Amino acid sequence: MAVSKQWDRDPLKVRISAMGVLGWVIVVVIVVVVASVAFVVIRRRRRGGRVIAAKEKG
Amino acid sequence: MRLLMTASQIRGLPVVTVRGGEDVAEVRDVIFSPEAGRLLGVTLNKRGFLAGRSRDVLPAEAIHAIGQDAVMVLDALSLVAPEDAPDDVAHPAVERNVIGDDVLTEGGLSLGKVTDLVLLVGSSGEVVGYQIEKPGGGRGYIPLPAQLAVSGAALVVPNITEEFVKDDLVGLGATVDEFRARLGLS
């Protein structure tokens, strides 16, 4: 019990908690950015949009 | 009614039936004949936000009209399976995408890069020219039949094409007949 209370007041725990929140924010931002880019790329590929010259005959 | 449209304006247009008013597909790729100077057909996407490619294609003969807001067909039967479509439309040569092609005169002068295709649309699709990005920046238009050769990498045009690069679509429309006359095509 005494150890637990001591740990609660430990500056290291406070720093780890703060880093944890920041870490989650960074992870969420990275996931959102990667997912958005992937979504745009996949959608573009699916939609196509080329202007194709047919092969010359003869 | 006939109007000038670019291929990028046609891409993504809904394909709507005249008889039922149904929205049956969406234009994906535009396929044209550089020799004949006409639209051969379009490949299609299914309708829907993330819907992918449709197996069916739409040959030019099955198009009732192309307008600024939709491509009209008589009914859903106008969309045909690849087995029943002309080979150029059923199996388009995807490596011959002209967007991004270098425009080079036969004398070796670069006129820019192809950014779009200009068509005269209505009940049919006639290709009238290419939209280009000039080397120094800015948009230009060159009339068809300009190319001596076309591939997925370069568009080779006669030397006199340089004189016929126009800055707007109105200028392009006015110059097509003169250009053809200079090439001895009319």
Image (cartoon, coloured by chain):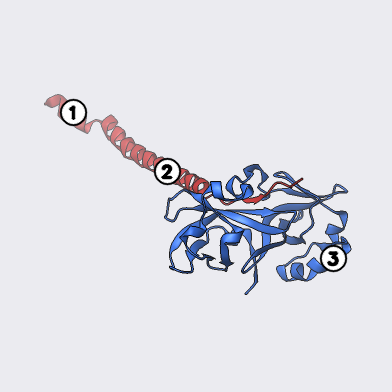
Q: Earlier in the sequence, mark 1 or mark 2?
A: 1
Q: Which residue position holds label 1?
A: A6
Q: Which chain is red?
A: A
Q: Quadrant of residue B167?
A: bottom right
| Residue A21 shown left or right of residue B51 in the figure | left
Q: Which residue is mark 3?
A: B186
| Residue type, mark 1 in image | Gln
Q: Assess disc 3: are there few (<14), some (14-19) or many (≥20) residues with their C-alpha within 10 Å of its C-alpha.
A: few
Name the quarter where the N terminus of chain B is drawn: bottom right
Badge 1 marks a residue whose secondary structure is helix
* Percent x, y of residue B78: 51, 59
Residue B44 in the image: state x and y as whole percent: 52, 53
- Colour blue, chain: B
For disc 3, the chain is B
Label 2 neighbour load within 10 Å: few <14, some 14-19, many 20+: few
User: Is residue B29 depicted above or below A22 in this figure?
Assistant: below
